[in-house]
Image: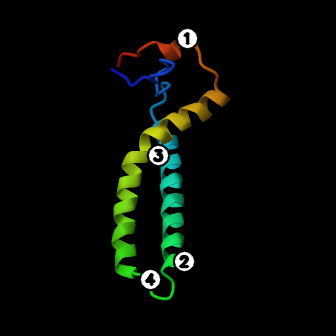
């Protein structure tokens, strides 16, 4: 069964096989922005001796955790962007069978 938005009942995938690419791209941009912001704050706060090893390993952990936890938000945000350009139709509320 396909995923549905819990608030409106619309299908999260609107019938395009490569729909996840938009959500993936949005997720990548959000996680990279988060990572750059955290990196900048840590370097500025700890400046003359930043903990480079902790920044390196923490950056890897933050990238993985951010990608996992931000993806549902990126997917629904991408759905909202898609709905702006392609308003919902009746078919978007009907479960498709492969």
> Where is residue 74 shown, x and y percent of the image?
49, 42
Could you say which disc has been placed on residue 24 in the image? 3
Marked residue nearer the N-terminal end (2 or 3): 3
Residue at the far front: name it: 45
C-alpha separation, residue under disc 2 versus residue under disc 1: 52 Å
> Where is residue 86 shown, x and y percent of the image?
64, 26
* Number of numbered discs on residues: 4
C-alpha separation, residue under disc 1 versus residue under disc 4: 55 Å
Residue to which mark 2 is pinned: 44
Give the residue drawn at x 59%, y 15%: 89
Residue to which mark 1 is pinned: 90
C-alpha separation, residue under disc 3 versus residue under disc 4: 32 Å
Q: Which one is in front, 16 or 87?
A: 87
Give the residue drawn at x 36%, y 54%: 65
Marked residue nearer the N-terminal end (2 or 1): 2
C-alpha separation, residue under disc 2 versus residue under disc 3: 30 Å
Label 2 Cα neighbours within 10 Å, binned few <14 / some 14-19 / many ≥20:
few
Residue to which mark 4 is pinned: 50
Q: Which one is in front, 84 or 6?
A: 6
């Amino acid at each position: 069964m396909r995923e549905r938005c819990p608030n409106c009942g619309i299908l999260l995938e609107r019938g395009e096989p490569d729909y996840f690419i938009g959500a993936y791209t949005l997720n990548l941009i959000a996680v990279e922005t988060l990572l750059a912001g955290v990196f900048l704050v840590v370097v500025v706060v700890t400046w003359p001796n930043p903990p480079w090893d902790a920044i390196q390993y923490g950056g890897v952990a933050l990238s993985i955790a951010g990608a996992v936890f931000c993806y549902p938000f990126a997917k629904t945000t991408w759905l909202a962007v898609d709905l702006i350009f392609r308003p919902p139709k009746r078919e978007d509320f009907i479960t498709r069978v492969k």
